[in-house]
Amino acid sequence: MKTNVSGSIVIIPTYNEKENIEKIVRKVFSLEIDFDILVVDDGSPDGTGAIVKRLQNEFTNQLFLEERKGKSGLGTAYIHGFRWCLARDYAYIFEMDADFSHNPDDLIRLREACVSGADMAIGSRYIKGVNVVNWPMNRVLMSYFASGYVRMITGISVRDATAGFVCYRRQVLETIPLDRIKFVGYAFQIEMKFTAIKYGFNVVEIPIIFTDRTEGESKMSTRIFREAFFGVIQMKMNSWFRKYARKADTESERT
């Protein structure tokens, strides 16, 4: 029996995901807990947006579409989605890929972690060993050691710093100045985790099994990897000159 839980929405950024988008939408809507979905499509030439529009006729008031012109990057897609969600009454806001590399069943576990006290729950591939399926070994090693590199440079303890399967409590996204999040590739995921921790939010990792896509094409590139590698150093240095006081904390100090 479905549990009617309001206030949870999953942001799914898309670019050329016609093979996956209908299946992922139907899977999320089949879960025992209700989630809305916001698809942020970057003008996919393969017709991904048209598929979502057709599905909106079936899933009225549950499935939403924001269309952008051109491929503008993962980070800007999520920032666009965050602003859209914050303008509405959502308590829990999720990031998830369209390609089933993230198991939609795990949305419930991430949400439960935030309901139980976490501010940000990360679906982690590396909290219990290496839980990755169908990736070539060089990709696994690059991702695993990238997270180690992030921990070394930033001092944060997150084991899967580049993870893109996340649940945020609303307050986190209201607190983080989204206009100051600069990275657009996978470094965006690192920057969001680092910034949430600097603001003192409770960030937890929930073990998941990550399965590489079986349909569609990966968006990873050497440019995205370079942004993440050099961006971490820049992000750490910039943090030395920033103050990370939450609005509520600042107000309480004045009283």
Image (cartoon, rainbow, N blue to C red):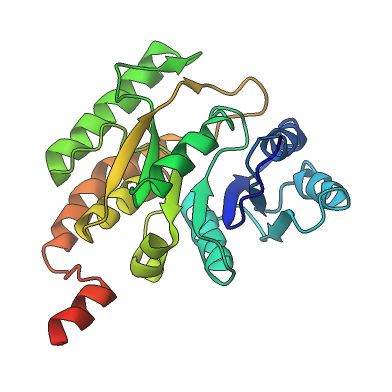
- Residue 150 shown left or right of residue 134 in the figure: left
Q: Quadrant of the C terminus?
A: bottom left
In this view, the residue in front, 116 or 141, is: 116
| 54 shown above or below 170 | above
Give how far across and how far down residue 159 sits, in percent. Answer: 26, 32
| Residue at image location 25% in from the left, 45% down from the top | 230
Question: Which quarter of the rendered picture does the N terminus lie within?
Answer: top right
Q: Quadrant of residue 123?
A: top left
In depth, the one of 122 and 41 nearer the eye is 122
Q: Is residue 137 left or right of residue 151?
A: right
Q: Is residue 111 above or below residue 93?
A: above
On screen, residue 141 above or below 245: above
Residue 177 visible, this angle: no
The furthest residue to the bottom: 255
Closer to the camera in the image, 213 or 234: 213
Left or right: residue 206 compared with residue 91: left
Residue 187 at x, y percent in the picture: 35, 46
User: Residue at 81% across / 49% down in the picture?
Assistant: 59
Vertical arrangement, residue 191 with respect to residue 3, above or below? below
Residue drawn at the location 34% of the way across and 65% of the way down: 176
